[in-house]
Amino acid sequence: MFELVLVICLAVRPDHCAIERPLSFERYPTAVECTHNSYVHVVHWLLEHPNWNVRQWRCEQPGA
């Protein structure tokens, strides 16, 4: 299983970043499927968190 991992930074302080593993998003059986479907989840997360920017995202196995 793979999950989406976001590197997020405050919009007003781009040097203040964190890693977010949104638990509300589904897990995927393969890295390819995760990568292919993650863009929609990134946009959804951004709409719910307007004070943050997503610097990058990736797919990882939980606990990696």
Image (tube, rainbow, N blue to C red):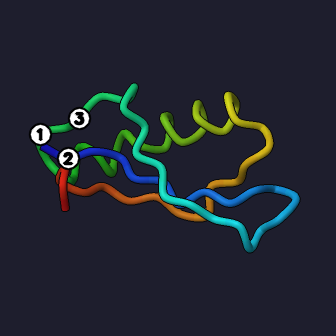
Mark number displayed over residue 27: 3
Q: Secondary structure at mark 3?
A: loop
Q: CA distance from mark 1 to mark 3?
A: 7 Å
Q: Are marks 2 and 3 in contact (CB under 8 Å)?
A: yes
Q: In which quadrant of the rendered image does the C terminus lie?
A: bottom left
- Quarter where residue 49 is shown: top right
Q: CA distance from mark 2 to mark 3?
A: 5 Å
Q: Position of residue 4 (x, y in %)?
A: 36, 47
Relative side of 14 to 42, left or right = right
Residue at 79% from the left image edge and 44% from the top image edge = 51
| Residue marked by disc 2 | 2
Mark 2 or mark 1, earlier in chain: 2
| Residue marked by disc 1 | 29
Residue at 22% from the left image edge and 52% from the top image edge = 32
Residue type for callout 1: Pro
Q: Nearer the viewer, residue 26 or 10?
A: 10
Q: Are marks 2 and 1 in contact (CB under 8 Å)?
A: yes
Relative side of 43 to 52, left or right = left
Relative side of 24 to 51, left or right = left
Q: Secondary structure at mark 1?
A: loop
Question: Callout 1 environment at 10 Å: few (<14), some (14 to 19), or many (20+)?
Answer: few
Q: Residue furthest bottom?
A: 15
Residue type for callout 2: Phe
Note whether 15 is above or below 57 in the view shown: below
Q: Which mark's residue is nearer the viewer, 1 or 3?
A: 3
Q: Are marks 1 and 3 in contact (CB under 8 Å)?
A: yes
Q: In which quadrant of the rendered image does the N terminus lie?
A: top left
Mark number displayed over residue 6: none
Note whether 16 is above or below 39 in the view shown: below
Q: Position of residue 12 (x, y in %)?
A: 88, 59
How many marks overall?
3
